Amino acid sequence: MTTFSFKSVGKTREERLTQQLIESDTPIGIKTPLRPGTQEGLFAMHYNLPDQVHDNLRNLILTNWGERVGFYDFGANLRPLMTEFVSQDNFDVQAIERISSAVQRWMPFVSLETFESIVDRVQNKNTAIIKLTIVYNIPALNVSKKAMQVTLYAI
């Protein structure tokens, strides 16, 4: 005769709640950049929590201090680094520090994994396009190794 425990059957309460949050029929947030919605309403909406976190993280990285009303120090503040772009190594160190501190303050549930930057000077010799690739995890949602690419323009 075999004895089983009911605790080992099915999903835990946290797993069910996480699954409900990930797969929602209710809109969670507005997609950025803003674009017209279809049957969902005035604007296109996110229905998936990991996609909304991805969108919010991209906005956090692209926002500079003073651009968010009511929260002067919201954002990674990368624009000053772009105007002072001297060397690739110096930029990488400063960008990693700024992105890391912004994520720790405003989105502590996101765990940053890797950072890579590529400088593209093909289009114009006097300016540069810097492409940042950031890989991150969201442990509370069981999302791992999600990547995003952000493009910055240096003067």
Image (tube, rainbow, N blue to C red):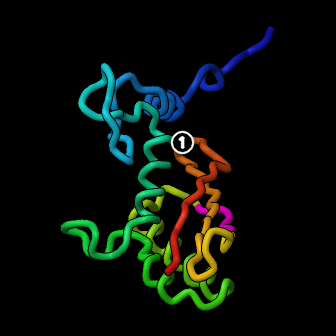
Name the one closer to the observer, 34 or 127.
Answer: 127
Name the one closer to the observer, 32 or 12.
Answer: 32
Q: Can residue 155 be seen by looking at this rendering?
A: yes
Q: Quadrant of residue 4 in the image?
A: top right
Q: Is residue 120 left or right of residue 152?
A: right
User: What main secondary structure does the magenta stretch of the protein show?
Assistant: strand
Span shown in magenta? 112-116
In the rendered structure, does residue 143 fall within the stretch colored magenta?
no
Q: Is residue 38 left or right of residue 105?
A: left
| Vertical comparison of 146 with 59: above or below | above
Give the residue at the far front of this rendering. 124
Q: What amino acid type is highlighted by mark number 1?
A: Leu
Give the residue at the far right of this rendering. 1
Give the residue at the far left of this rendering. 70
Residue in the picture at 31% in, 33% down? 36
Circle 1 crowding by C-alpha within 10 Å: few under 14, some 14–19, many from 20? some
Residue in the picture at 51% in, 89% down? 84
Q: Is residue 84 left or right of residue 9?
A: left
Q: Secondary structure at mark 1?
A: helix
Task: Give percent across and percent down for residue 8.
Answer: 65, 25
Residue that numbered label 1 is attached to: 141
Q: Quadrant of residue 71 in the image?
A: bottom left
Task: Give percent across and percent down for residue 47.
Answer: 41, 31
Q: Can residue 119 be seen by looking at this rendering?
A: no
In the rendered structure, does residue 115 fall within the stretch colored magenta?
yes
Total marks in image: 1
Task: Give percent across and percent down for residue 19.
Answer: 51, 29
Residue in the picture at 80% in, 8% down? 1
| Vertical comparison of 70 with 107: above or below | below
| Vertical comparison of 108 with 125: above or below | above
Task: Give percent across and percent down for residue 119.
Answer: 66, 73
